[in-house]
Amino acid sequence: MEVVLSVAAGELVSRFFSFLMSKYSENACSEEKRVERLHQLLLRAHMVVEEADRRYITNSGMLLQLKMLSRAMYNGYHAVDTYKCNQLIKEGSKEVTTTDSCASYLGTPLKRFRANGGISIHKVDNSCDLQDALVKLETVVSNMTEFVILLSGCESMMVRRPYDTYLYVDNFMFGRQTEKQQVINFLLQHNPLGSPSVLPIIGGTLVGKKTLVKHVWNDEKVRSYYSSVLHINGDNFCKIDNEGTSGRTIVVVTFVSDVDDEKWKSFYQAVSCIGTETKIIIVSRTESLARYGSMEPIHLSRLQDEEYNYLFKTLAFGSARAEDNPKLTLLAGEFIKLLGGSFVGAYSFAYRLRTDLSLRFWLSLLNLLKKAMKKNLSLYGENVYPFKQRYPIDLTDFLPSTAAPLHIMPPRTESEVSQRKLPKIRLKDILVNPSLRPRGDFDLVTWESRIPPYTEFCNHVTPCAQQQLKTTLRRKRDATICL
């Protein structure tokens, strides 16, 4: 009887394991099919989005549909990357469980870094992410027939797109395709009331408000329609000089705070004297200024996570294929988490990463970034993202051990820069050769935009910054003792 039970139990266990193996194979095959289908849809979606970027789209419904397609596309790219990274983590976990020697697990820099807690091994639900992205993209693509037909009838732009995607992203404004079309449509419309129309562009710090305006001004059709563009600072916007200004003019006024209604009326009357086809664009972070608009305001916010992921990886890998570097793709996700959606951070770090696609270099730079952020967190009690701070930042860890300490202050205002000219040096140059560092105070160019208005993001560096950091530490220590 015991022999029969033993045989029966063995048969049940064998069938159970066979069932699990077949189920796992089915799931793996199903996931691979989803990834393949997602790749096919992404190719079609990218083709439509790229073509739409070369056309003048005046239909608001088409612009809304284009935005939906773009978001579904970036969500699909993110889902595929997440799936591949999780597959890599699974493979690493299998190696740990099937190897007796811990030394073999620590054999590569990536495993050693992950073992020290540098990379989270938390795994998302692959099937859910893939399935959700696939359903969204299939739904949007299946409804694109009318969009593609109408798109073929839209006027083409005179734009030469580079062959490599990263060259296009690096030299053109990314993620603002719909907003760009909206501003162009506003500028090319006749003023309905015979008086200047007003378009407010509202958004937070460093989201690309001025860059959007300049990008639109560089459009060939806009430049041929208008004779000039007049940039006005909100501090003295009432002192508008319209002498010598004639023809169609774009007036761009930048406000840092709210303004009085009477002052706005006076300004608007002065602009009206320039010409009936004059257009006003308000650029500001203040939402209340939208009340002066004759059109619905355009709101700019930071990129969605999926869009930012695509931007950073495209810039970091350059002409290389992210698919051929799965371990670097995993590390890119760690940089993205730390940079917190910063445009300046993305372009600055991606430039350095692109110069050396070795795993060891990426790990060393990630460790340095983590160390710098941890140091600033201990100093000020909050996470200070690079180049977007209210306090000094210690970047000494990014320099060779023999270099002098490097502490950067918050960026100087435009008026401060104009009042006191200081020597300038680029961050990437001083990181390579610290001896280039000027003596005394200087401006450190953390990043230079490669698209108009070619903004330089400068931080002030002063020998006093180190003393300020010591004072902050002493005050923090004294406060802790008092508690």
Image (spheres, rainbow, N blue to C red):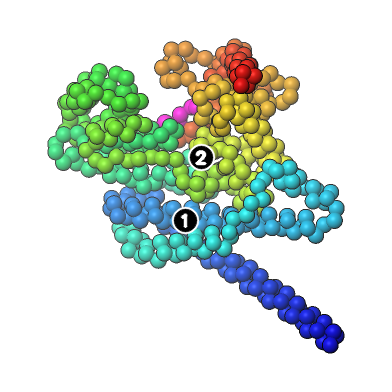
Q: Does the magenta stretch include residue 455?
A: yes
Q: In which quarter of the image is the C terminus?
A: top right
The quadrant in which residue 377 appears is top right
Residue situated in front as seen by the camera: 88 or 208: 88
**Of the residues shown, which amino acid type is indicated by label 1?**
Met
Q: Residue at horizontal 43%, vertical 36%?
A: 207
Question: Looking at the rendered structure, which numbered label has been put on residue 57?
Answer: none
The nearer-to-camera label among 2 and 1 is: 2
Residue 175 drawn at (x, y percent): 44, 45
Is residue 91 toward the left or the right of residue 75 in the image? right
Residue situated in front as seen by the camera: 408 or 359: 408
Please give the residue where the numbered disc 1 appears in the rendered image. 73
Q: Residue at horizontal 65%, vertical 35%?
A: 370
Residue situated in front as seen by the camera: 313 or 50: 313
Please give the residue where the numbered disc 2 appears in the rendered image. 341
Q: In which quarter of the image is the N terminus?
A: bottom right
- Pointers 2 and 1 in contact (CB under 8 A)? no
**Which residues lie in the magenta part?**
453-458
Above or below: residue 335 compared with residue 246: below
**Helix, strand or loop status at disc 2:** loop
Q: Residue at horizontal 55%, vertical 66%?
A: 34
